[in-house]
Structure formats: structure tokens, C-alpha cells
Image (cartoon, rainbow, N blue to C red):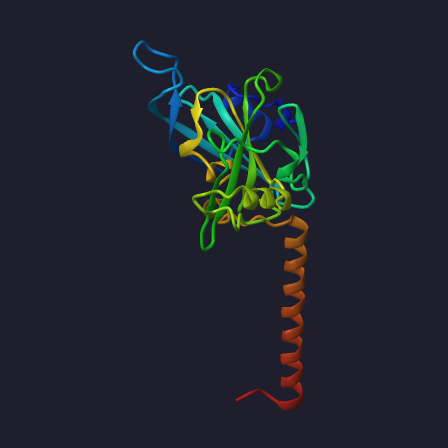
């Protein structure tokens, strides 16, 4: 967490690797980026598609760190996800402080449906929920997206929130029940419509392919099966001694 708190938008990718080592995954992703107002074009109009480099670090058995970098390898946004009850870090969301894996979504102000979500996805096996928060100058003019990723823990699928009407009572009930397991910090200029809700955390279909197990558990399992094999061999030899060689 000390290393995580040293990260901010526009830091260099090399600086992040100094804190966390080399990432396990890296791929390209195209997003929409806002540009400065140009004559004849409305302010904040998305003008171009840009390709970002997305890198993911497994934080041992505890969670994941993801960064999104431009062509100059500047970090434009980054996310933190907890996947263990042993990892409950305190994280700043503008002027608010939350505990990943413990704080309910309802502890933060309700999102404005018109321009800040919520975004949600509920399929047969995958789900995500995300909502954006912006606090102006008290938040350093950054944006925070908090929510629920199926790559994290605890898991609370957004059941009841997946209707086009986004019924306020259903979303409110979900916000009280769900615990935030992921947070995405965004610098200026990124349009989130093409990123959320899955972009709040790493892609589960990718990260679950890496077998993450505690070294002590691996050693204990290895010894267990070695002992079990030895016992089975001893029983087989003992049976052969009493009954003679098997036909």
C-alpha cells in the first residue's frame, strides 16, 4: 500500500515497475480521449481514439494492480482490486476514505445517472458494476470509479440493476448490500463509456489462468501427496508379502 500511494496520474510506467516489479500481463486497448476545445467543436467533445497499453500485476494472493498508459508510457489511469479477506486497504476517494472489501457503495454519494453511471453488466457467468465520483478541487480534479468486479472479493452481482430504466430503488438497495472491491483512479481526458464497467479491474478470463497459490500451501500439499503415495506403496508391498505376487 505504501507503493500504491506513491502512484498518481501521469507518473512514468518505469516508476511503477520500480515499485511493483514487472507486470504479468500487457495488452493494447483503444479508448476515446477528450481534447482541448477547437474552433467549431464543442468543449469536451471526444475527438479521437487512442491506443493505451494496459498492464496488470498480481499482488501475491491479495489482489491486482492495473495501469493504463499512453504512447509516452505515462499512467493515465490505474486500478486496485482486492481478492482476499486478508487485504482490506484504506483508499482515498477524493475527500472520502473507504476500505476495499468492506465499505458499502452507499457510503459514497449516489452517482448522477445522467453522466456518471452506474454502469453494470450481468451475464451468465461474468458481472461488473461501476459508478463514477468527481469532487472538483477537493479531489484534485481527478475522477474515481468504485464498484464490484468479478475478479475481486467479496462478490455481489448487480441483480436487479440490469434493467434499462435503472430503477432508483433497485440501485439503492444494491448500493447498500454491495461492498466495494475495486477502485479506478482516472486523470483528465479519458472518456469512460468504452471502458466501464469491466475496466474497473482486470479481466477475470485472463487473470484466473494464472494459478496463484500460497507457497506454504503448495509445500504442504506436496508433502501430503508424497506421504499418501508412500503409504499406498507400503500397503501394496505388504499385500504382496502376505498373498504372494498378484497375477
At x 63% / y 69%, what residue is drawn? 229
Asked if residue 227 is positioned above or below residue 101 in the image, the reply reads below
Asked whether, in this view, residue 173 is left or right of residue 121, the answer is: right
- The front one of 172 and 24 is 172
Q: Give the percent coordinates (x, y) of residue 129.
A: 52, 41
Q: Position of residue 187 (x, y in %)?
A: 50, 21
Report which quarter residue 81 is drawn in: top right
Q: Residue furthest top?
A: 39
Residue 239 in view: yes
In the foreground, 206 or 35:
35
Q: Quadrant of residue 88?
A: top right
Q: Does any portion of residue 59 appear in the rendered image?
A: no
Residue 110: x and y in percent read 58, 33
- The residue sitting at 45% across, 22% down in the picture is 73
Vertical side of 216 occupied by 16: above or below:
above
Total numbered badges shown on the rendered structure: 0
Identify the residue shown where x is 58% and y is 45%.
174
Please state which of residues 120 and 185 is positioned toward the viewer in this rendering. Answer: 120
Residue 152 image offset from top left, x and y in percent: 57, 44
Image quarter hosting the N terminus:
top right
Q: Residue furthest left?
A: 40
* Residue 227 in the image: above or below residue 130: below
Q: Tell whether 3 sits left or right of 125.
A: right
Task: Check the image and report above or below for 103 versus 158.
Answer: above
Amino acid at each position: 500500500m505504501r507503493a500504491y500511494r506513491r502512484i498518481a496520474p501521469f507518473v512514468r510506467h518505469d516508476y511503477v515497475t520500480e515499485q511493483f516489479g514487472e507486470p504479468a500481463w500487457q495488452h493494447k486497448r483503444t479508448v476515446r480521449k477528450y481534447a482541448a476545445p477547437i474552433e467549431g467543436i464543442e468543449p469536451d467533445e471526444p475527438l479521437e481514439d487512442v491506443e493505451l497499453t494496459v498492464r496488470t500485476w498480481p499482488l501475491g494472493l491479495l489482489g491486482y494492480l492495473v495501469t493504463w498508459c499512453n504512447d509516452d508510457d505515462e499512467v493515465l489511469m490505474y486500478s486496485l482490486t482486492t481478492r482476499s479477506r486478508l487485504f482490506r486497504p484504506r483508499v482515498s476517494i477524493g475527500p472520502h476514505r473507504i476500505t476495499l472489501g468492506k465499505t458499502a457503495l452507499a457510503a459514497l454519494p449516489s452517482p448522477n445517472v445522467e453522466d456518471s453511471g452506474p454502469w453494470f453488466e450481468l451475464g451468465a457467468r461474468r458481472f461488473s458494476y461501476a459508478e463514477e465520483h468527481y469532487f472538483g478541487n477537493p479531489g484534485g480534479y481527478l475522477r474515481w470509479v468504485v464498484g464490484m468486479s468479478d475478479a475481486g472479493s467479496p462478490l455481489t452481482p448487480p441483480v436487479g440493476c440490469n434493467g434499462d430504466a435503472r430503477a432508483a430503488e433497485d440501485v439503492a438497495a444494491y448500493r447498500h448490500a454491495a461492498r466495494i472491491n475495486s477502485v479506478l483512479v482516472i486523470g483528465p481526458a479519458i472518456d469512460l463509456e468504452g471502458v466501464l464497467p469491466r475496466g474497473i479491474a482486470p479481466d477475470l478470463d485472463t487473470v484466473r489462468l494464472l494459478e496463484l497459490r500460497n507457497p506454504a500451501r503448495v509445500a504442504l500439499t506436496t508433502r501430503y501427496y508424497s506421504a499418501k503415495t508412500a503409504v499406498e506403496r507400503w500397503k501394496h508391498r505388504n499385500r504382496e508379502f502376505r498373498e504372494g505376487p498378484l497375477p
